[in-house]
Image (cartoon, rainbow, N blue to C red):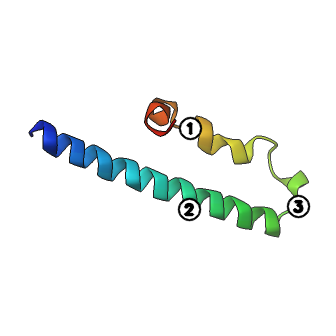
Amino acid sequence: PTLKQLQTELSAIKAEIARLQQQNASLCERLTLVCPVTVLETDFLSKEITRYPFFSEYYY
């Protein structure tokens, strides 16, 4: 693959990750509406931030 192809693929992957993170945040928000916060693990909602640290350089 050429550099341009790899950059295009990386861009598409980053867009998909962003979409999935947004979907995850939305689902977590819905979950908090259904379950009392005390039922959820205290760090449950923060796991999305730490799960893929190797992508952090692309988003910040």
Residue 43, by quadrant, is: top right
Q: Is residue 23 above or below residue 11?
A: below
Residue kind at label 1, given as amino acid type: Arg
- First-in-chain label (2 vs 1): 2
Q: Which callout, 2 or 1, points to the residue nearer the camera?
A: 2
Q: What's the CA distance linking mark 2 and mark 3?
A: 20 Å
In the picture provided, is 60 more to the left or to the right than 2?
right
At a point 82% along the width and 42% down the height, the residue shown is: 42
Q: Secondary structure at mark 1?
A: loop
Q: Nearer the viewer, residue 53 or 2?
A: 2
x%, y% of residue 34? Answer: 80, 69
Q: Secondary structure at mark 3?
A: loop
In the picture provided, is 56 more to the left or to the right than 29?
left
Q: Which callout, 2 or 3, points to the residue nearer the camera?
A: 2
Q: Residues within 10 Å of mark 2 (few under 14, many from 20)?
A: few
Are circles 2 and 3 on residues that touch, CB within 8 Å?
Answer: no
x%, y% of residue 13? Answer: 34, 49
Residue kind at label 2, given as amino acid type: Gln
- First-in-chain label (1 vs 3): 3
Q: Can you identify the residue that label 3 sits on?
A: 36
x%, y% of residue 11? Answer: 31, 48
At a point 39% along the width and 54% down the height, the residue shown is: 15
Q: What's the CA distance linking mark 1 and mark 3?
A: 24 Å
| Quadrant the N terminus occupies | top left
Q: Can you identify the residue that label 1 sits on?
A: 51
- First-in-chain label (2 vs 3): 2
Q: What's the CA distance linking mark 2 and mark 1?
A: 15 Å
x%, y% of residue 55? Answer: 45, 35
Q: Can you identify the residue that label 2 sits on?
A: 23
At a point 38% along the width and 47% down the height, the residue shown is: 14
